[in-house]
Image (cartoon, rainbow, N blue to C red):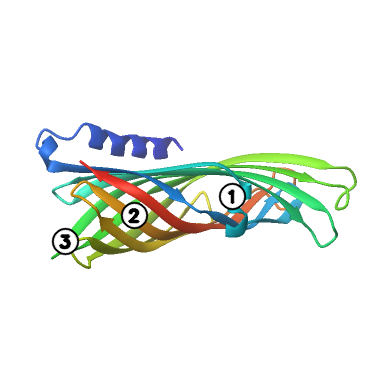
Amino acid sequence: MNITKLYLFSLIGCLIFPSKATSADDWEYQIEPYMMASSIKGDAGVGRLNGIPVEVGFDDILENLDIAGMIHFEALNNSGWGITLDYGFMDLGADISTTRGAIVDVAVHQGVFEALVINRNQFGDDTLDYTFGIRWWDNDIDISIDPAILSGTIDTSVKEDWVDFVVGIRYSHKLNSQWVFVIQGDVGTGGSDSTSSFASGFYYKMTDQWTLDLRYKSTWVDYKDGDAGTQNYFAYDTTTQGPVIGFSYKF
């Protein structure tokens, strides 16, 4: 974790304190608050419990979403090198009915932070970005199981965080003066067994500074810690996905 923090601070330091050979005019910045109508599907394991379904569908999103926030930041130098920072979190809660008529109350807090280096290559009006960096996961899960499953109501909670190293690409194709098609993806590993993400959609340029972001995004992770069946076991194999809408400001 110390190496990861040093890497992250180095990236941010290079952004905030550029070398003397560059000036403010060499950099372009953009910041984008966005919303994602997210669902989380998969399963989790906590302690001696395994295969616990974690599923919140689109139809239930308004009922189960407690709070969420997402923001994206990019800085790009005219040399083609830059950095992106992205953070999103959501708190979801759901009552899951089992085949035995029991109720499992699941509350999930999921936060994901990404810090990536960009290397941009220009092909006419199109761009191809190579990216590499880290994805940090912060997960809290609270589970309450009624006696229909186990004797006596059981309440358990777990707090886990880990870091994955990821590499990816992002391709943007200019359709006309206002519309841009974008597709991107990455793969990685580290704290988790594996992780990947995929996003595709369109940017709509409203003005020279403001852009509407309309995409669909999916992020998958398979994480395990400890031995199955033991008290300290934790597993998280889920896909977070949904449509994204955001407004990007360039300066």
Question: Which of labels 3 and 2 is toward the front?
Answer: 2
The residue sitting at 76% across, 51% down in the picture is 49
On residue 247, the disc is none
Comes first in the chain, label 1 or label 3: 1
Q: Residue furthest right?
A: 151
Secondary structure of residue under mark 3: strand
Q: CA distance from mark 2 to mark 1?
A: 22 Å
On residue 213, the disc is 2
Secondary structure of residue under mark 1: helix
Kind of residue sitting beneath label 1: Leu
- Horizontal side of residue 51 vs 187, given as left or right: right
**In the depicted structure, whether residue 119 falls above or below residue 16:** below
Residue 166, image x and y in percent?
40, 54
Comes first in the chain, label 2 or label 1: 1
Residue closer to the observer: 16 or 174: 174
- Find residue 152 and report its image quarter: top right
Q: CA distance from mark 1 to mark 3?
A: 41 Å
Residue closer to the observer: 28 or 2: 28
Kind of residue sitting beneath label 3: Gln
Kind of residue sitting beneath label 2: Asp
On residue 62, the disc is 1
- Horizontal side of residue 101 vs 198, given as left or right: right
Residue behind mark 3: 122
Question: Which of labels 1 and 3 is toward the front?
Answer: 1
The residue sitting at 35% across, 59% down in the picture is 168
Q: Residue furthest bottom?
A: 175
Residue 63, image x and y in percent?
63, 49
Residue 138, image x and y in percent?
53, 41
